[in-house]
Amino acid sequence: MRPNTILIVALLVVSAGVLAAGCVTPGENVTQPTAPPTEAETLARTPLATETTAPPAVTETPARTPLTTETTAPPAGTETPLATETETATTTTAVTTAGGGGTTTVDLAAEDIAFDTSTITVPAGAEVTVNFDNKDDGIPHNLAVYTDSSADEEIFVGDTVTGPATTTYTFTAPDDPGTYFFRCDVHPQQMTGDFIVQ
């Protein structure tokens, strides 16, 4: 090797050492250069970006309004119809009444050994007038009212009349509503009916 070449190489070595010595102060830690981080390391160190979405706008549900029912009064001067009373006409019922338990008039006939009705209806406590018509020629009949069909306890017993004849019976109906019993005492099996007190 030529002396010039040896000198140049020696200078380069010394220069490199000086440069290296100038960069490091005695007592300092020297950090060795490291390779650049891998993609996996970069991802591990980088915090994941989280997508934040704003919460949906709060929608208020309107308060429910209770349904109201509007009631209107009928115009002034108009009458509200009252419930109609149904009158039941029965061919087997003889009754003529006056309200309030006052007086009641009943028409009752006897013909062919039978009454013309099987039911007499009167108000409780009413004064009852019975217009009795016996149409059977030469046959006696009467009207008698009892508490029940045993005829043990009488409410009213009318006089017997022989037909053809008419008479009027008057008596007071029981105060207690219920179904009582009436008959002809002369023909107690054939001539009977219900005496209804309301």
Image (cartoon, helix red, strand yellow):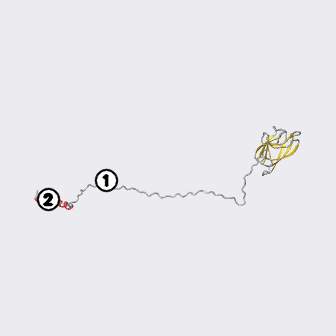
- As drawn, is 8 to the left or to the right of 167? left
- Where is residue 75 shown, x and y percent of the image? 70, 60
Q: Secondary structure at mark 2?
A: helix
Q: Quadrant of the N terminus?
A: bottom left
Give whichever of 170, 86 is nearer the camera.
170
Q: Residue at x 10, y 59 (%)?
A: 3
Whichever of callouts 1 and 2 sits on the residue coming sooner in the sequence is: 2
Q: Which residue in the protein does label 1 denote?
A: 41
Residue type (three-letter) at the residue carrying disc 1: Glu
Q: Which residue in the protein does label 2 denote?
A: 10
Q: Residue at x 14, y 59 (%)?
A: 10
Q: Residue at x 77, y 45 (%)?
A: 196
Give whichever of 101, 94 is nearer the camera.
101
- As drawn, is 31 to the left or to the right of 196? left
The numbered disc on residue 132 is none
Q: Residue at x 17, y 59 (%)?
A: 17
- Where is residue 64 shown, x and y percent of the image? 56, 57
Q: Is residue 71 above or below residue 121?
A: below
